[in-house]
Image (cartoon, grey):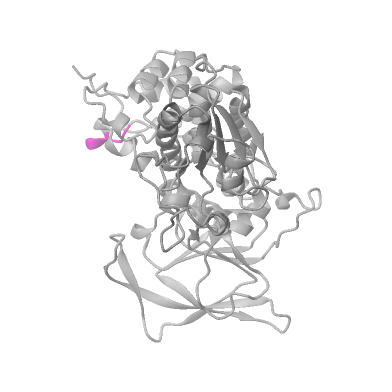
């Protein structure tokens, strides 16, 4: 029998005042206290069908950990989370629970769903404060070696699961810090880097070897990881980091950035602390960010914190079609971001020094729905207008980096350059090679990439158990299924 419904709305998350936080890279949300967490967890009605579990890409036993929080058993709640999720402090901060586990919460049918993400963050932060650790013991060593290419959410999850299964795991990361998009793509005010590195330290505790500054396709090719380094299987989780720019005049002007470069300079290279850190970044006074997703929100809110007097978000559809999390849009508006809807740039104008000085835009109207289900934007003739800007950041999607596919000709890819892999197992048509996350699907969420890493880890484990003596080198004709 389900528990009687009590509080009908979510327990509010405490936040730093907008007037303070727009000038700081400190974290915006401050997290639940013990009292607030138990209050929110008590809202769960303990329904029998538990749809939230099916809504979680990494299969967390959500009712169990929520029940443990309500009872004050925070250690138990952490063990429940850790059984399925290597990165609870990350997921509790940046995963779109409103479109996954919370979306299908039974309580949410009539009232606000249980704040599962906020509770996950609370448990993870409590565990870090109390120095709790996962008590589950890994399996006995299997003698098999697995290489993970990329240390983003998919790669980290696959590495953790495979290490727990007893395999020897090595991660190869191109940049100088592990974490992938968690480090370079999400700003400090949403996801502190100390949180990410703390989660990654759990991997090294499992025996995972992390090699940074290793560009696979240059340092080693995929085939060399097998033939020269002796790996038995390989998982590619390199993400989709190739920036896209629109085909309009002026995109080569000085002061025009991709969101990838803008956020990497600010986040991973700490350019916002120049000259203390020696990677400079433009500190525009009038900054325009093009796009309507979470990356666009991260970029425009970063611009504010770097001192912009005007930070514009230019989006070609309406507010209802905006793919960014509603919470992030609200935070941006509270901080002073100026959102310009139903508009798109047509040209960037430069001065005599080839620096951007203005952006010419056109007003848009919404037409028929496109393949995404959103109504397509249509330009309105004669509606052009200009905005004075000195910095423009394009956050209009990313593609697959061509390096691995160019050095691995027998690895099939789609016409867009994404690796062709089985969605349930991550298996590619190249024996022993698996892939998952954005390099397969295109840009998606942190938690969906983690789910892909988990499914691939299970498939890799099964593959390794079927390998003949001598490993991959003795199985050239083996086709993974």
Above or below 71: residue 413: below
Above or below 344: residue 31: above
Question: Outermost residue toward the left?
Answer: 1
Q: Position of residue 424 (x, y in %)?
A: 34, 40
Q: Residue at coordinates 44% horizontally, 62% vertically from top-left?
A: 416
Q: Residue at coordinates 38% horizontally, 25% vertically from top-left?
A: 40
Q: Is residue 3 left or right of residue 210?
A: left
Q: Position of residue 309 (x, y in %)?
A: 63, 63
Q: Position of residue 249 (x, y in %)?
A: 55, 81
Above or below 3: residue 180: below
Q: Nearer the viewer, residue 30 or 399?
A: 399
Q: Position of residue 28 (x, y in %)?
A: 56, 41
Q: Nearer the viewer, residue 109 or 145?
A: 145
Q: Quadrant of residue 413?
A: bottom left
Asked if residue 40 can be seen in this view, the reply is: yes
Q: Residue at coordinates 55% horizontally, 59% vertically from top-left?
A: 406
Determine the main secondary structure of the stretch shown in magenta. Answer: loop
Above or below 266: residue 364: below
Residue 112 counted in the magenta span: yes
Residue 175 counted in the magenta span: no
Q: Quadrant of residue 391?
A: bottom right
Question: Outermost residue toward the bottom?
Answer: 382
Which quadrant holds the N terminus? top left
Q: Is residue 178 left or right of residue 240?
A: right
The residue range painted magenta reads 108-113
Q: How many marks?
A: 0
Q: Residue at coordinates 38% horizontally, 32% vertically from top-left?
A: 115
Asked if residue 151 can be seen in this view, the reply is: no
Which quadrant holds the C terminus? top left
Q: Nearer the viewer, residue 18 or 204?
A: 204
């Amino acid at each position: 029998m389900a528990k009687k419904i009590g509080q009908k709305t979510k327990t509010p998350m405490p936040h730093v005042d907008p007037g303070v936080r727009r000038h700081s890279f400190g974290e915006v949300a401050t997290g639940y206290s013990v009292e607030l967490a138990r209050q929110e967890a008590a809202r769960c009605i303990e329904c029998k069908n538990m749809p939230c579990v099916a809504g979680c890409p990494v299969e967390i036993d959500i009712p169990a950990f929520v029940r443990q929080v309500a009872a004050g058993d925070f250690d138990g709640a952490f063990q429940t989370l850790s059984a399925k999720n290597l990165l609870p402090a990350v997921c509790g901060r940046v995963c779109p629970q409103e479109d996954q586990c919370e979306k299908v919460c039974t309580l949410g049918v009539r009232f606000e769903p249980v704040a599962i993400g906020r509770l996950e963050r609370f448990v993870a932060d409590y565990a870090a404060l109390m120095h709790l650790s996962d008590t589950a013991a890994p399996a006995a060593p299997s003698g098999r070696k697995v290489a993970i290419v990329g240390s983003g959410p998919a790669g980290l999850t696959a590495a953790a699961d495979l290490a727990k299964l007893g395999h020897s795991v090595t991660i190869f990361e191109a940049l100088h810090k592990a974490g992938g998009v968690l480090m370079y793509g999400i700003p400090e005010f949403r996801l502190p880097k100390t949180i990410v590195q703390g989660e990654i330290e759990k991997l090294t505790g499992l025996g995972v070897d992390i090699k940074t500054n290793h560009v696979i396709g240059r340092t080693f090719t995929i085939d060399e990881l097998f033939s020269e380094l002796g790996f038995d299987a390989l998982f590619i989780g390199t993400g989709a980091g190739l920036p896209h720019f629109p085909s309009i005049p002026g995109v080569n002007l000085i002061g025009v950035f991709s969101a990838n470069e803008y956020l990497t300079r600010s986040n991973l290279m700490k350019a916002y602390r120049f000259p203390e850190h020696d990677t400079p970044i433009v500190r525009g006074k009038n900054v325009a960010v093009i796009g309507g997703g979470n990356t666009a929100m991260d970029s425009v809110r970063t611009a504010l914190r770097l001192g912009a007097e005007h930070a514009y978000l230019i989006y070609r559809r309406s507010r209802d079609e905006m793919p960014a999390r509603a919470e992030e849009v609200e935070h941006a508006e509270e901080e002073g971001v100026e959102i310009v809807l139903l508009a798109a740039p047509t040209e960037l104008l430069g001065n005599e020094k080839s620096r951007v000085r203005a952006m010419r835009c056109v007003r848009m109207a919404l037409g028929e729905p496109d393949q995404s289900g959103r109504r397509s934007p249509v330009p309105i003739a004669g509606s052009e207008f200009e905005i004075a800007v000195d910095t423009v950041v394009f956050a209009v999607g990313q593609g697959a980096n061509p390096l691995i596919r160019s050095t691995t000709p027998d690895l099939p890819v789609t016409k867009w350059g994404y690796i062709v892999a089985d969605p349930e197992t991550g298996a590619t048509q190249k024996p022993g090679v698996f892939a998952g996350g954005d390099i397969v699907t295109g840009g998606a969420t942190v938690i969906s990439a983690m789910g892909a890493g988990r499914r691939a880890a299970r498939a890799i484990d099964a593959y390794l158990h079927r390998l003949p003596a001598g490993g991959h080198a003795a199985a050239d004709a083996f086709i993974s299924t």
